[in-house]
Image: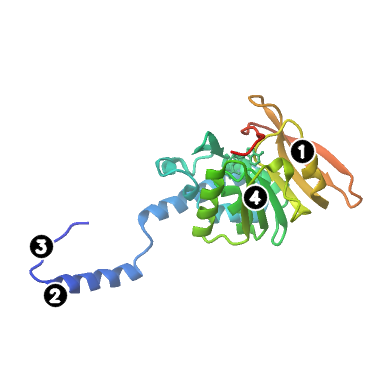
């Protein structure tokens, strides 16, 4: 901001008052307008590539993805690609977040377990839809920062826990949906057990460094599960042992 030389404290306080009045009716900063415009363009592109679920698309229009990445990556926050979030981990590609959120048919009041909190972005998308979210992260520093970030951004109804996702969250099971955002070699049995009848799991399955298969597991009313392949994907591995 340019500052003009002012003769007196009175002039300074009059100017401050005028500026405050102007600020109160001024539009939000240009930067956030740019973010919003880019975010809408990204979600338009995601819709054009086949995501139809209106709850998913509306949530992704609302959640400020840039707030989940490092400041130096803000220029790329609304590009359709994963980005580093520290500790060798990544925030998923937006298209994949949309695809997985649509696949579990996330709806208001659904109880959802996420394994792999990472930045907290996927959890925020689910919370924005109105889901009750339980999310587990194995790296303590990521769990702690995601918890603070979600709180600051005003997301209620998200519990972040530092723990091992292989065990699920038996105290609050069963879940209407379970999303894995790190890839195990095979689907952990505890998670299948913690899925409610009529529920869905979406998970990348496969060995580290290989192309994994994103699968959808559906549990019917009788508790029988069926699994189908949806998409080839590449996620970070689901690891064993707390850090
Ligand atoms: N959903 C995240 C991206 C997750 S990246 C987001 O929206 O930003 C995958 C995350 O899974 C990493 O943070 C990694 O530390 C975590 N992870 C890996 N193995 C895990 C395990 N066994 N239990 C819980 N979290 C795990």
Query: Residue at (34%, 70%) from the top-left corner?
Result: 24
Which circle marks residue 5 in the picture? 3
| Residue 160 placement (x, y as % from top left) | 61, 52
Question: Which of these two is toward me, 163 or 45?
Answer: 163
Number of the front mark, 1 or 3: 1
Dot placed on the residue nearer the N-terminal end, 1 or 2:
2
Dot placed on the residue nearer the N-terminal end, 1 or 3:
3
Quarter the C terminus occupies:
top right
Residue that badge 4 annotates: 135
Number of the front mark, 2 or 4: 4
Dot placed on the residue nearer the N-terminal end, 2 or 3:
3
Dot placed on the residue nearer the N-terminal end, 4 or 1:
4
**Image quarter where ligand 1 lies:** top right
In three-dimensional space, the C-alpha distance between marks 1 and 2, rounded to whole angstroms, equals 69 Å
| Residue 31 placement (x, y as % from top left) | 38, 52
| Residue 89 placement (x, y as % from top left) | 55, 36
Question: Which of these two is toward me, 26 or 147?
Answer: 147
């Amino acid at each position: 901001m340019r500052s003009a030389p002012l003769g007196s404290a009175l002039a300074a306080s009059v100017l401050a008052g005028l500026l405050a009045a102007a600020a109160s009716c001024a539009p939000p900063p240009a930067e956030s307008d740019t973010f919003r415009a880019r975010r809408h363009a990204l979600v338009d592109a995601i819709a054009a590539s086949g995501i139809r679920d209106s709850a998913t698309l509306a949530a992704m229009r609302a959640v400020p993805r840039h707030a989940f990445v490092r400041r130096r990556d803000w220029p790329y926050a609304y590009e359709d690609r994963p980005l580093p979030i520290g500790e060798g981990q990544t925030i998923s590609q937006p298209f994949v977040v949309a695809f997985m959120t649509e696949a579990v048919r996330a709806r208001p009041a659904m109880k959802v377990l996420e394994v792999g909190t990472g930045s907290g972005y996927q959890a925020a998308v689910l919370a924005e839809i109105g889901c009750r979210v339980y999310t587990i992260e194995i790296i303590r520093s990521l769990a702690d920062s995601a918890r603070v970030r979600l709180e600051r951004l005003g997301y209620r109804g998200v519990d972040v826990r530092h723990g091992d996702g292989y065990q699920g969250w038996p105290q609050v099971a069963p879940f209407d949906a379970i999303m894995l955002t790190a890839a195990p070699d095979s689907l952990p049995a505890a998670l299948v057990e913690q899925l409610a009848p009529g529920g869905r799991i979406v998970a990348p399955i496969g060995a580290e460094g290989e192309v994994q298969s994103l699968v959808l597991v559906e549990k019917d009313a009788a508790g029988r599960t069926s699994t189908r392949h949806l998409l080839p994907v590449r996620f970070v591995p689901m690891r064993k042992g707390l850090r």
